[in-house]
Structures are given as C-alpha cells and as structure tokens.
C-alpha cells in the first residue's frame, strides 16, 4: 500500500530520466542522420525525413514512453486531488450540519439512532481504559471491539504518521491503525 502512495513520484522521476534519455539518443544519432542525408544528396525536409527516420526510432520510442510516464503521474495526482476534494467537501458538510445544531440536539439524535439497533452510546470518558467495548464509527457505520486505551493509541499513532508525512493521511489509514 505504501508503494501506491509514491507512484506519482516514481512516474515523475521516470519522466525526468526519459527527457534526458530522449535528448541523449537524439543527439547521439544526429551525426549518423547527417551522414545519410549527405550520401543521399537530398534538399527538402520531407526527403531528409524519409532518408533518416529509422535512425531516430530509439529517440522517438523514448519520447513516447516519457510522455506516458508524465501522463501517468498527472493521472495519479488528479485522482489523489479528487479524493482529497471529496473528503474536504464531506468535512465541510459535517461541520456545517453540526454547527447549525446544538450539542444536546446531536446527543438526542445519536441516542435515537443507537436505540434503533439496541446500542447505548457511552461517553468515552466513562469507559475504563482496559474494558473491551463495542465502538461504532458514525462516519462509515462500522463497528469494532476495542478498549479505550487501544483507540487512544490508534489515534495517537495515526496523528504521528500524519505529522511525519507532512499532513498526508486518510480515513482508511486511521481505520488500519
């Protein structure tokens, strides 16, 4: 999963190497192409291209692959930006909804929702650190068993990883922790 996160950087690096490789291959083959043009004795651009196009096949292939790497890097970054925009929009919606309501209203709503499935919401402060309880994530609707201490450690570990990665983090990574 970590390799997937660095793919745009890998594609970008390969694209940069490809630019240099294409320039090198083209420059390396130019003397051969000039010699072929001189031997053929042609003057027009079209005739020159017909005589020496085969010499530039490696440079052309390198250029095409380089363009593919740059396009792949852009595609990966565009997908990542779309995911971030979706998460940002979701966060704005949640903040807007909760800022419009008071805390007692929210608690009543959560209690009503929990009563439907026979789950009673606990104040996390009232749960001891070593007692295993059923937790429910209200964003994804997933339920899991854990101690309060395990949840605190997972959140701390996630926050530490986000700080180390210059603010990069996702909800899925939090679930992994």
Image: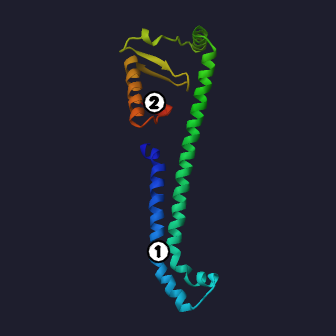
Q: Is residue 23 left or right of residue 114?
A: left
User: Which residue in the protein does label 2 denote?
Assistant: 174
User: Compared with residue 162, is residue 123 higher up or lower down, i.e. above or below?
Assistant: above
Q: Quadrant of the C terminus?
A: top left
**As displayed, is residue 164 above or below residue 110?**
below
Residues 129 and 24: in front is 24
Horizontal and vertical percent position of residue 32 = 47, 83
Question: Looking at the image, is mark 1 or mark 2 earlier in the sequence?
Answer: 1
Image position of 29 (left or right of 91): left
In this rendering, the label closer to the viewer, 1 or 2: 1
Q: CA distance from mark 1 to mark 2?
A: 51 Å
User: Mark 2: few, some, or many residues within 10 Å (few <14, many ≥20)?
Assistant: some
Residue 40's label in the rendered image is none
Locate residue 74, reporting x and y percent.
55, 51
**Residue under the image location 56 percent in, 25 percent down:** 139
- Pick the quarter of the image with the N terminus: top left
The residue where tag 1 is placed is 27
């Amino acid at each position: 999963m970590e390799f997937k996160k660095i793919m745009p950087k890998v594609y970008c690096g390969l694209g940069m190497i490809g630019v240099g490789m294409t320039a090198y291959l083209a420059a390396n083959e130019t003397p051969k192409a000039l010699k072929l043009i001189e031997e053929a004795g042609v003057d027009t651009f079209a005739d020159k291209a017909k005589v020496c196009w085969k010499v530039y096949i490696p440079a052309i292939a390198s250029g095409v692959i380089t363009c593919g790497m740059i396009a792949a890097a852009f595609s990966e970054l565009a997908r990542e930006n779309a995911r971030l925009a979706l998460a940002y929009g979701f966060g704005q919606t949640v903040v807007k909804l909760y800022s419009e309501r008071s805390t007692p209203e929210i608690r009543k709503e959560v209690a009503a929702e929990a009563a439907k499935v026979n789950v009673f919401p606990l104040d996390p402060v009232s749960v001891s650190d070593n007692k295993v309880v059923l937790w429910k994530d209200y964003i994804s609707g997933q339920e899991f068993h854990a101690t309060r201490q395990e949840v605190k450690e997972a959140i701390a570990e996630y926050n530490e990883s986000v700080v180390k990665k210059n603010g990069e983090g996702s909800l899925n990574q939090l679930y992994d922790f």
